[in-house]
Amino acid sequence: MLIEFFNQKNNSFKKVNLILASFFFSLMTVCVKKIDNRIPIYELVFFRSLLSLLITSLIINKKNLNPWGKNKPLLILRGILGTIALVCIFYAIKNMPLNISTVIQYTYPIFISIFAGILINEKITKNLIIASITGWLGILIILNPYQLSSLNIELDKFTVLIAFLGSISTALAYITVKKLSSTEDIFIIIKYFPLISVITLSPIVFFNWVTPNINDLIWIIGIGMFTQAGQTFLTIGLKKLPTSEAARINYLQVLFGSLWGILFFNELININFIVGAVLVLLGTIISTSKKLKKI
């Protein structure tokens, strides 16, 4: 009984990592939305990545780790996917209500299940079909024009597509992180994300520079610090828990995002939004219940 008690305690402590990751990522979205619209999205991603790269490099140096890791191709792919996802997510946050952009972002567990079937030859099960139908029904309820008009919200189709591209890229990055976590130190995995972002975005930022003011700099630092904390706790959580549990716990960010939207941006939610969000969560639970334990 004593061993079982400590095992349960240890498992609960592992879950705390993912709860903290969701909390810090949600604070990052607040910082993104607070920044003046004159600052381009790619510049925000560059600053966020630069701060994260500096912090992670210092930690790697202190731990005397090989800074380049073992599986370089997969680490580079993780960085590319993360960069695409972050640009799309930041764009969606800036151009959509925070609660809606967060719900769309958290369709990624359903995409993970789909990609597991495509990339690692997992069987497409009845559970996955049910999960996909349930999740997309929730999204349709949330994005229904009548539902949006009742909240005085107008959404551009391009912005919605970008938001879903962010979710798809997140799902692919999620699979690479899980695979890398068995062979790489967590800070090596984290480092490649901002490293690739800084390398790819530097030319764009250099030729299209917009100088942030003091207020913007405060929020930009917040983006870097909160994202670094979120990435650290997320990577630890993915290493310690099955992906299925991780995906469900990470959905807490929808709750945090909706709360911050109400408190800081005067966003409204109604029963349709709640029903849609619950259906997306239900789709996530169904899709991750068995399949992702095999990843």
Image (cartoon, grey):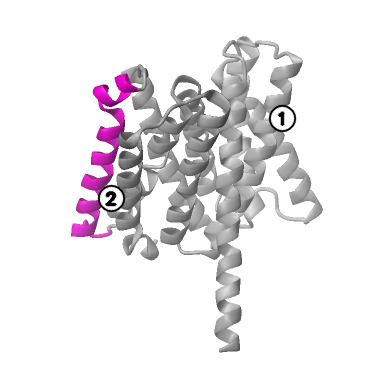
Can you say whether 157 is above or below 180 in the image?
Answer: above
Query: For residue 227, what is the image quadrant?
Result: top right
**Residue drawn 61% across the image and 22% down it:** 34
Element at label 1: helix
Amino acid on which disc 2 is placed: Ile
- Mark found first going from the N terminus, 1 or 2: 2
Element at label 2: helix
State the image coordinates of residue 133 (x, y, percent, origin top left).
21, 45
Residue 243, numbered circle: none
State the image coordinates of residue 139 (x, y, percent, origin top left).
29, 36
Q: Residue at label 1?
A: 221
Residue 118, numbered circle: 2
Can you say whether 162 is above or below 56 in the image?
Answer: above
Amino acid on which disc 1 is placed: Ile
Residue numbers of the magenta segment = 122-150
State the image coordinates of residue 231 (x, y, percent, origin top left).
60, 46
**Residue drawn 60% across the image and 72% down it:** 10
Q: Is residue 263 visible?
A: yes
Can you say whether 30 is above or below 228 in the image?
Answer: above
Check the picture and name the quadrant holding the N terminus: bottom right
Q: Residue furthest right?
A: 62
